Amino acid sequence: MKTTAEFGQLLANRRKELGLKQKELASYAGVPGASLSRLENGRLPEFGLRKLVSLLTVLGLELDVRPIGTSGNLDELRKELGGS
């Protein structure tokens, strides 16, 4: 993922998977609804780390940071290759 727009789309997809409305997620995470909407729609160039961590927590996601070009773990590789 290289842009905030891609990240926003990932969050929107997860929110929808969980059956949450933007307003609900914003409320649970303690972030302004307008900011969440702009993030999900790729119109927010900057989003604070505290807000991001709060959103990820509510969505049941975690952030995995690693050097560009490095492979993930074996489970990620299996999933990528279509295995179980």
Image (cartoon, rainbow, N blue to C red):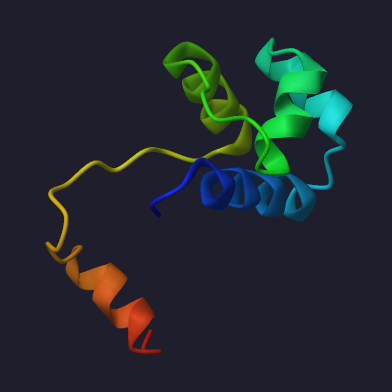
Tell me the residue at 61%/37% (across/down).
59
Q: Position of residue 28 (x, y in %)?
A: 74, 18
Q: Is residue 55 left or right of residue 32?
A: left
Tell me the residue at 70%/41% (across/down).
40
Q: Position of residue 37 (x, y in %)?
A: 78, 32
Relative to 42, is 25 above or below? above
The quadrant of the image that shows the N terminus is: bottom left
The quadrant of the image that shows the C terminus is: bottom left
Q: Residue furthest bottom?
A: 82
Q: Is residue 26 left or right of residue 68?
A: right
Q: Position of residue 71 (x, y in %)?
A: 15, 66
Q: Is residue 84 left or right of residue 27?
A: left
| Total marks in image | 0
Relative to 72, is 9 above or below? above
Tell me the residue at 53%/27% (across/down).
57
Relative to 56, is 9 above or below? below
**Residue 17 falls in which quadrant of the image?**
bottom right
Q: Position of residue 64 (x, y in %)?
A: 29, 43
Tell me the residue at 72%/27% (across/down).
36
